[in-house]
Structure formats: structure tokens, C-alpha cells
Image (cartoon, grey):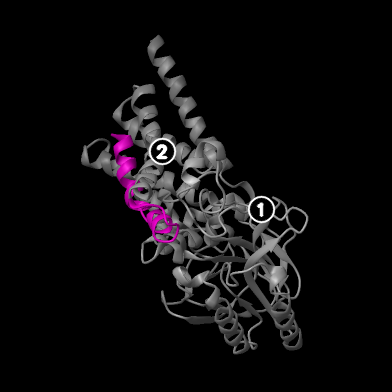
Amino acid sequence: RGWLFGLGAFVHGIHWIYYSLHYHGGTPFILASALVVLLSAYLALFPALAFYIARKWFPVSIEKQLLLLFPASWLLMEWLRGYLFTGFPWLQLGYAQIDTPLAGYGPLIGGLGIGGLTLLSAGLLAMLMLKKKILYSLIGLSGIWLLGFVLMQFNWTTPVDRLIKVSLIQGNIAQSDKWKPQMHGPTLRMYHELTKQHWDSDLIIWPETAIPDFKHRVGNYLQQLKNEAEINGKDVLLGLFIRDPDTSRYYNSVISVRDGEYLKRHLVPLGEYFPLRGLLSFFMRWIDIPMSDVDSGPEQQSLVTAAGQPLGISICFEDAFDRDIRKDLPQATLLVNVSNDAWFEDSPEAWQHHQIARMRALESGRFMLRATNTGVSSVIDARGEVVAISPQFKRHELMTLVQPMQGSTLYSIAGNFITVILACLLLLFLVFDLRTSSRT
């Protein structure tokens, strides 16, 4: 039942992968659908294992199952899902609580820990429905949510320097048109013209691969943009590919036209690289995604500085990995995510991605600036609240003021260490409890 639950949740929750494979990758309908189901079937193993551990390994009372076993086993399996085979932490339970009082725990235990508290809250509600320990269940449930509300009132990081004016350029280039040769010139002219209208902003950000080309092939264009940026004393970040002249390999990158670059570290399986090439050579013949065989950048990279601020940059789904965001903290005073969710058409993916970005901002106590090709482009504050947002599937320039932040939240220091250790200790306690009970 746990596996069937997971299968339904993931087929529904990540069905948008089909759009990138079929419409933009040329994968036949049957194969694209099969790949979504197969990936979902694999991901469903994690909730299945969580339920199996709770029901088969620990023959304890229903109270202990609901309040200890299910939250602990689920939390551990969600954590494992974010690491195994490079990880796929999409649809973690905690993301759904970004607009509830449980969000108050974000700077302390992160989205993963919030997911554990969600399961604990569900267990307490189930206890009430079963009419077991009603008073204690009411106290526990209200206490968890009331404390979350109280924690929301705290500021875990502090402002540094002045407010910065930013402009996020949403080019709205359809994915089906992005790589057409006849679109190359118009795309570059469009971004240049829109940028010239925003030289009053301190920082201008373009989306992932806004320039559908290699850096060395648009050198004159970038030099002109750099000259204008220096004359106006402003900074421009943009996405494009960088080719290594020695190896002829290339990287999905973000550069500052004045100085600095970031090479994407965490690549998308099948979309940017092919895992287990020998086993998946069959699929490679059926998937024709442009620029889908790139290299990953170094794990440790110097932060790009723009508008006088060190930036924690992530590309595409890198912001789904809290550990990748934490690598740039506490040095980074602002977070930047550039993405191109046009791969997934008008599906829930863009809004799921936006929700994940909000959690990363909350966990780190930093503003998050999201520049995307077709939406959702947004500015998110240090509490995970949306400051400004662009409409989807429209060419739009989003302008607002942002506040650089300094300091560390508990989560940015410890990550998931506390919650994972606590979950393990709960299981060890139940093992000890079972052994003690069997002896008596």
C-alpha cells in the first residue's frame, strides 16, 4: 500500500517530465510515458520502505506507530531520496507547509524537519479520531503549531549594507523556438534592449541559458554589454554555456559580464547527463534534448560578486537541494536562482519549483532572486514570503528592492544533521523498548 500510495503521488506530481521528453526531446509517446512511470515506481520505493519499517520491523502500539515510527521512518526515507543516485528531493512533504505556522521551524530544522512535524501532526489528529489520549493529543498538536507561529516572529539573520535595486528579465522564449538558428539574433537583441531600459538598477539578471550559445562565440556581444555595464556602474548576470577549449566539454553557467562565473554543479539526469551510459544507451537513441550532455562544475567555487554582494547562485533544479545552497553560506548575502521551466509547458512544475525556492530562502534567511525564461520569476524575502512575482508566459521585467542579509540560521549551519540524528535515536529507542518489553 505504501508503494501504491507513492506511485500515485509521484506519477501525478512529476508527470511534467513527459513534456520535456516528448514535446522537446522527441521521445515517442509510449517511451516518454513509460519513463515517467518507471521513475515514479522507483521513487515510490521510499514511502513503501518507510511504511514497511514502521509496520514490519516494530510491532509496537498504535500510539507509538503514529507519534514516533511513522514520522521518523518517513523523514529518513525522504532524506535518503535526496541523496541516492544523486538524489531527487522533489515533492518533499515539508514544502506544502510554507504558508502555515509550521514554516516557523524552517530556519531551525529546514523543510525536511517540517515534513517530520507534518507527519507528527497527522499522527496526533489520528489519535484524536481514534479517541486515544485525547487531552495529550490536543496539547501536543496545539503546542507544535503555536510554537511554529511564535518562531515565525523571530529574525534569524540581520540586514547588511543598503537596499539594492534589482531587475529580473523574463524573456518568454518558447522552448520550441529557443534553439532555432533564426531566433539567435532576435533573442540577443531583445535581452540587450530590455537591459538598456534598466541601467538604473544595481543588478540585472537574465534566465538560465538566456543566450542559447557558447560564451566564446558571443564575445563581441558580451564585451559591448560589459562596456555599458561599466559605464553605468551596474552588474548583469546571464546564463549561457561555457566550453573548455582543452577538453571541448561544456558547462551550464551563469556569468557576470564584469567579472566572475558559476558552473552548474548538480546536473539533471537524462536532461543534462546520462547516468549509467552503458545501460541507458538504448534511451539515448530516443532522447534528443539540446545541450543534454554537459559536465558538472567543481564542488567548491568562488562566489560571484555583483552589486557589491557575494551571491549564492544556483541553476535550474539545484535549489531543490538544500545542501547545495548551504555550500555558499554564510558568505552569500543574496541567493540567485536562474531557471528555464519552459521545458514543462503549462504544468504545475514551475509552481512547485517556486515553492521549493521559497523554502530555501526561509531556511537560509536570505532573499532569493529567481529569473526564469517563462515564469515563475520572483523575488522572495528572508522569511520565504513573495515580494514580487512575474506573470507566466509573458515577456516581463520584474523590478524591486532587496535587502542583503548576513548571519547564519541554525539550519544553514547544521543542515539536516539534527533531524536525521533525532529520527535515528527514535528508532533506537523503540528497538530498546521492544527488547525490554520482550524480556518482561
Kindly indicate the quadrant of the structure image that contains residue 169: bottom right
Foreground of the two, 130 or 135: 130
* Front disc: 2 or 1: 2
> Residue at (66%, 58%) from the top-left corner?
251
Report if residue 373 is visible in the image.
no
Q: Which residues lie in the magenta part?
A: 1-29
Whole-number angstrom distance, CA of label 2 to CA of label 1 = 28 Å
Disc 1: CA contacts within 10 A as few (<14), some (14-19) or many (>=20) = some
Q: What type is the residue that disc 2 sits on?
A: Tyr
* Magenta stretch: dominant secondary structure: helix
| Quarter of the picture holding the N terminus | top left
Q: Which mark is residue 401?
A: none
In the image, residue 205 lies at what x, y percent?
60, 75
The secondary structure type at the circle numbered 2 is helix
For label 1, the SS is loop
Is 117 above or below relative to 370?
above
Q: Which residue is mark 1?
A: 327
Q: Which x, y percent locates residue 257?
A: 71, 75
Locate residue 101 relative to residue 247 in the image: left or right. Answer: left
Q: Residue 42 got which mark?
A: 2
- Viewer-proximal residue among 194 and 96: 194
Name of the residue lying farthest toward the top: 439
